[in-house]
Amino acid sequence: MTQLLIIGGSDAGISAALRARELDATVTPTIVMADDFPNFSICGLPFFLSGEVPDWRNLAHRTTDDLARAGIQLMTNHRATAIDAENQVVTVIDSQAQEKHVAYDRLIIGTGAISNRPSIAGIDLPGVYFLRWMNDSFAVQRHLTEFEPQSVVIVGGGYIGLEMADALVLRGLKVTLVEHNPTVLKTVDASLGDMVKAELQRHNVTVANGVSIEAIQPKGNQLQVTGSHGFETIADLVLVAVGAKPNTQLAESAGIELGLTGAIRVNRKMETNVPNIYAAGDCVETWHRVLNQNTYLPLGTTAHKQGRVAGANAVGSNQEFAGSLGTQVVKVFELAIARTGLRDFEAAGFDPVTIESEVWDHKAYYPGAHKLRIRITGDRQTGKLLGAQIAGHYQGEVAKRIDIYATALFHEMTVEAVNDLDLSYTPPLGSPWDAVQMAAQAWSQALHH
C-alpha cells in the first residue's frame, strides 16, 4: 500500500488527495497542514470580511468530516520543517512543539504562496494587516469588530486590493487605495484599468496611482501613511496586498530545484527533480499553453488542476497537466473585469495586434443592456487568437464570455474561427452574433483595412 503524504491542505493538496483516493481506494492520503482550515476558499475571504458571507465556516469547500469520510487523514496544526528525500521521511512539529517523523512512498508539496512584504518602514505595526490565509482574515475581522475603524488605506491595486476596497466600502469605511503602477489592476491593459479606477471613484474610493508607500507610523490612535510624490494620509487601518511569492523554503532544503520564476520547477506530470516528490499549486511554475514555456501564475483554478494531476500520478497514473492560460475574473462593485491568454507585451515570439471594441451585452432594445469593452489580441501573421480582455457590468456575463475566448485559446483557434462558434441567442441575453464574435469581427476588419 502506497504511503501518500501531502504537505499543504489548500486547493492543490486537497485535489491531489481526492484524486488519489478516486483512483486507488487502498491509499489513505495524509495531509500535513500548518493551520486548522483544510479546503477553505481563500478566494472567499473578501466576501467574509464584507459581511456578504456572514459565517466564515461557509467558506469550507468540504468539512473535516467530509474529508475523513473521503478517506483522507488530516494532521492539522502541524508544520513540516524538513524533508529527508534519501530516507523518504518528513519532519513535522505540532502545536505543542513536539517533533514527529512521517514516512512516505510518494510526497506531494502544496505549500502555496506567501504574501509579498514590501520594504515599508512600520509594516509590522499594530493595525497593519496582510490577507492570504484564514487566520489573516480573522485578525482583520477582529480589528473591524473591536476597534470599529472608519478609514483604511489599501496598499496594492490588484485582485485582493480591489475586492477589499469593495468589501470595506460595503462595511461603511472610507477607503484609500494606493497603487505604484500608473493604473490599477495591471493584469489588464490601461484602458480597462481606467474603467476600474472610475468605478472605484464612483463609490467614493480615493485612488492614488503612481505612488509607492514608504512609511507607516503611529499618529495618536491612527496610522499615518506616507509615500512618494508627497503622498500622505491618515487611517485607522492599513491593508497590504501587493501580490505573493511561491513558498519554496521547505522544498529547497530538500534539494528540489527552482525554475527561472523562483517557483518550484516541475514537469507536466508535476514531478520535481527529486524522485517520488511531486509539487502543485501556488508554489510551482505552471506550463503556459500559448507560450509553450513555464511561467508563474498563482491561481486557485490552476492549483486544483495541478493537484489532480499530481494525485493521479502519485498512485501510478501517467497524466500531464494540460497547461494554463491565466484566465481570471474579478468583480469590483458593479463592474466585472476578465482576461485570458496574452497581452501585446507578453506575446514573445508572436506578432501581436490588439484591437478594442465596444459592444452591447444583449440586444439594445431589450431593457437593461450594458456596453462591454472587449480587447482582442491576435497574431498578425497567422490570425491566431492570443488573448482577450473584457470589462463591463457584472450582469453582462463577462466571466462566461471570457471563458469562450479561453476555450478558443485552449484549442488554438484563430480569431476568425470564433465567428464559427454556434453560440446561443435570445434578445434579453445576447445577439445573433454574440459580443465575443462582434469583437472578433472588429479585430479582423481592423487588420484588413
Image (cartoon, grey):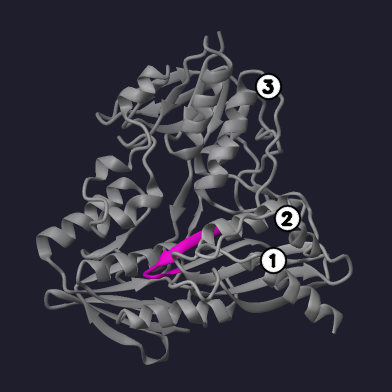
Q: Secondary structure at mark 1?
A: helix
Q: Quadrant of the C terminus?
A: bottom right
Q: Secondary structure at mark 3?
A: loop
Q: Nearer the viewer, mark 2 or mark 3?
A: 2
Q: Residues within 10 Å of mark 3 (few under 14, many from 20)?
A: some
Residue 219 appears in which quarter of the rendering? Answer: bottom left
Q: Which mark is residue 317?
A: 3
Q: Nearer the viewer, residue 325 or 158?
A: 325
Lateral position of residue 101 relative to residue 418, left or right: left
Q: Secondary structure at mark 2?
A: loop
Picture coordinates of residue 312, whole percent (x, y)? 61, 25
Q: Which residues are magenta?
A: 328-335
Circles 2 and 1 in contact, beta carbons < 8 Å: yes
Circles 2 and 3 in contact, beta carbons < 8 Å: no
Q: Is residue 324 magenta?
A: no
In the picture as drawn, the residue positioned furthest to the bottom comes out as 230
> Is residue 184 shown to the viewer in this render?
yes
Rendered residue at 21%/73% (across/down): 173
Rendered residue at 78%/53% (across/down): 412
Q: Nearer the viewer, residue 351 or 441?
A: 441
Residue carrying label 2? 421
Residue 331 appears in which quarter of the rendering? Answer: bottom left
